[in-house]
Image (spheres, rainbow, N blue to C red):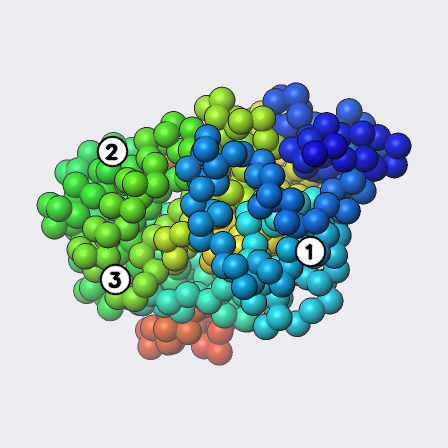
Amino acid sequence: MVLRGQGRTFASLAEAMAKANEPKSGDELAGLAAADGAERVAAKAALADVALRAFVEEPLLPPEDDELTRAFLSELDGAAYGRLAGWTVGELREHLLAEPPETLAALRPGLLPEMAAAVAKLMSNLDLMLAAQKLPVVVAGRTTLGELGRLATRVQPNHPRDGVDGVLASTLEGLAYGCGDAVIGINPVDDRVEVVRRLADALAELRERLAVPTQISVLAHATTQMRALEDGAPLDLLFQSVAGTAAGNRAFGVDLALLDDADAMIRARGRLDGPARWYFETGQGSELSSTAHAGLDQLTLEARCYGVARRYRPLLVNSVVGFIGPEYLWDARQVIRAGLEDHFMGKLIGVPMGVDVCYTNHMAADQNDLENLAVLLVAAGCNYLMAVPMGDDCMLSYQTSSFHDAAALRELLGRRPAPEFEAWLEARGLMEHGRLTARAGNAEALL
């Protein structure tokens, strides 16, 4: 497919998609980015006139080469697709900004991830926020996440030696500050079954003893968690990082067959009721880091990650937007844009999106940039953010949102915790009418 826009010619849809993307250092590193602003605008103009059916008739990654493409095409709902196949990408944008939420939700089964990526490239930051806010994704475990007016958090009690004492201390502090309604999720240093079991046992015992309405997840590799489940580990959710190509997933040590097996196991052995049993993490640039990007831009590949997640009906999906580093997102402007894109694309595809509003210490960003993005995402209806002591992860060595940030964002933007968790906080005198009390932060109130 040859595309033309404003006097420029693009040899393929993939080229136009890449050059229509907002500036990203990862696309530049891959040699895919527009040469200048004029070429970027021309690519956007060309992309706006592409019919959505082109993404089905000429897939960016051929189905014979990539199992994800095969899965996306096979899962496409024919009736929903038929209603929008003749729209152009530009017309999809107009519908997203003009139509009511119930109309937009009906589009989801007919959308390929690449369509979500294409329309994101035509949207301003405010467009991305407005459309995402109209596309809530409500899911339920022990807490209900994603409802309008709610903001949940993941307590991330990481510890540099997987010390149970330190993990539990961080967890108690986070709970006392009103955090943890999305999940208590720890990244273990040591990816061994016995470590997963030890951490899961400790967190599950704490959750049960305090009757905390939340979920437990230990973010080891899926295969390690599967072995831990076989050993009796009390896991509520399975976790896995995923990529937007089959080759990228192989670099993570997974494929769809393995994820299917893991899905069957967590549904048979997991401790959580209901259909939502997964926690997926993603991030723009991960495919390029393993030379598995197949010539596609990082935004398009990120959308395909959400297509993988949608297959498994997750409770949590999280773009760790600023974690991979300046090779892929150079500075705060790029991180802010990527965070809004990721949140919008996930919501459009129909997955329950959270964002790890974060940056690494070698990136051109600071705490003020992090807070700016957090405000924008909460205004756009983000399901949950991270909550880490002082916003500084002592194991992963990056900066993210803190227990205090969550409270400030809820107060500033009129958000409340998940309803079940709010009731639990109120029963312990830590919250009244959606706001923390003077007792907040005192873990002794929980014991």
Place of residue 172 in the rendered image (x, y in percent of width and height, measured from the top left)? 31, 56
Measure how far apart labels 3 and 1 are at the Cα level: 42 Å
Estimate how packed mark 3 is, as few (under 14), some (14 to 19) or many (20 or more) residues with alpha carbons within 10 Å: some
Quadrant position of the N terminus in the picture: top right
- Residue underneath mark 3: 272
Measured as percent of width and height from the top left, residue 253 is found at 32, 31
Dots 3 and 1: beta carbons under 8 Å?
A: no
Q: Nearer the viewer, residue 140 or 38?
A: 38
Dot 1 alpha-carbon crowd within 10 angstroms: few under 14, some 14 to 19, many 20 or more: some
Nearest to viewer (mark 3 / mark 1):
1
Residue 14 seen? yes
Q: Earlier in the sequence, mark 1 or mark 2?
A: 1
Instruction: Report the residue that reaches farthest toward the left.
Output: 231
What is the secondary structure assignment of the residue under circle 1?
loop
Residue 191: mark = 2
Mark 3 or 1 closer to N-term? Answer: 1
Q: Circle 3 — which element? A: loop
Amino acid type of the residue that numbered disc 1 sits on in the rendered structure: Gly
Q: Earlier in the sequence, mark 3 or mark 2?
A: 2
Image quadrant holding the C terminus, namely bottom left
Corner quadrant of residue 248: top left
Q: Position of residue 356 (x, y in %)?
A: 50, 46
Query: Which label is found at residue 86?
Result: 1
